[in-house]
Amino acid sequence: MSFLRLLRFHTAGESHGRGLTALMEGLPSGLSLQMERDVDPELARRQGGYGRGRRMQIEQDRAELLSGVRLGETLGSPLSMIVWNRDWENWTTAMGHLPPDPDENPKALRPMYLPRPGHADLVGVLKYARRDTRDILERASARETAARVACGAVAKRLLGEFGIQVGSFVRSIGDVRARDPEELPEDLNAVTDASPVRTLDPDVADAMIRAIDQAREDGDTLGGVFEVVATGVPVGLGSHISWDRKLDGRLGAAILSIQAIKGVEVGLGFEAARRLGSRVHDPIVREDAETRAGGFVRSSNGAGGLEGGVTTGEPLVVRGAMKPISTLLKRRLPSVDLRDGSAREAATERSDVCAVPAAAVVGEAMVALVLADAFLEKFGGDSMEEIRRNFDGYLSYLSERGWGER
């Protein structure tokens, strides 16, 4: 099953390899795109957030464009980018591409034989017939999301041309929960990025920071919940026709594909299961002003902008639940030694204490990629001009449809 049909992307690279590469296919021609303006700021946002580890002090992520753009505009051909790893210079031996020198000190290869519970270490070595978990953890690392964010930044640029904006905020870290915002700010990311924990509730920001500090002191980690919101989304993206075209299913898979994400909600999510139907479903109201839903609006948005796998024209609301990071700095969990099967404590690796604020930025990227694919599915064309004609024609149809039957 492929969730990204028209707009496809792939990433490659290891956490401590030379760099992370990203390949996108399906972009139209004529999209204005500049790395420094459109992609690098998103990479910087991913590196921020209270609770990040020392790796973020080493890396200063920038995307280098390799193909797909000429004179500031996309060509319609595959777009390729690379984010170089500055830490590579310290890993040239351990992550080298050639067979090791027989006289090399084995420790210089930085092997790891003590799999961490909650990580891909053990299942990976069993599946791929390896013994050194570094063969697994380097690719399973969330460092890979830098390439995803680069692709997501391009998708955001495409969506922005049609008035669709994607932002996020942190709802909870550990058991510290922010209050539900009465109203989202117009520029969501401008507000949340100003907070070290990317929360909209300033009254709990200090408590979140204290919780992270306590976890760090204890050698432990913390997870949490983030929310991604897309505004300006027109009615009609996705489809009820087939299970794999339902947009909520595609969004759910995209969010769950992010490292350490173990739960996803759309709109009210699990809360809807605890309410009566009269307190869940969103009343339909006619509105005189033109909207991206044909003059029909909802007086609430418990559905999170999706009904029957199709966007309603209301803000799209998706949440991701992130488990605590599996690498503990002091409280080592029981594990085994893959060399002899003996009982040991799990290995440690340089890591974050809490990465929920950064995961929210990755969530934005994945939502943007799915939305951009669904947008092209609905309004597809080979060029920005063709897509804009299709989109404008659809909005005109919605405007007419909102006033009666055609």
Image (tube, rainbow, N blue to C red):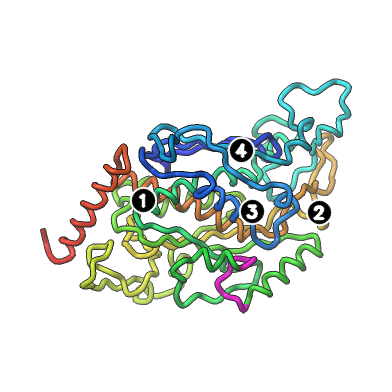
Name the mark on residue 47. Answer: 3
| Front residue of this view, candidates 246 and 104 | 104
Q: Given the image, on which type of amino acid does mark 3 rest?
A: Gln
Q: Given the image, on which type of amino acid does mark 2 rest?
A: Arg
Helix, strand, or loop for circle 4?
Answer: strand
Residue 32, image x, y percentages: 41, 44
Say which quarter of the image contains residue 7. Answer: top left
**2 or 1: tag closer to the N-terminus:** 1
Q: Residue furthest left?
A: 406
Q: Which residue is mark 4?
A: 20
* Quarter that holds the N terminus: top left
Q: CA distance from mark 1 to mark 3?
A: 32 Å
* Residue drawn where x is 53% and y is 37% of the image: 65
Name the mark on residue 246. Answer: 1
Is residue 161 positioned above or below 123 on the image?
below
| Magenta residues (range) | 195-203
Is residue 106 positioned above or below 300 on the image?
above
* Residue drawn where x is 62% and y is 35% of the image: 13
* Quarter that holds the C terminus: bottom left
Residue 49, image x, y percentages: 65, 61
Residue 382, image x, y percentages: 31, 37
Q: CA distance from mark 4 to mark 1?
A: 31 Å
**3 or 2: tag closer to the N-terminus:** 3
Q: Which residue is mark 2?
A: 332
Helix, strand, or loop for circle 2?
Answer: loop
Q: CA distance from mark 2 to mark 4?
A: 30 Å
CB under 8 Å between callouts 2 and 4?
A: no
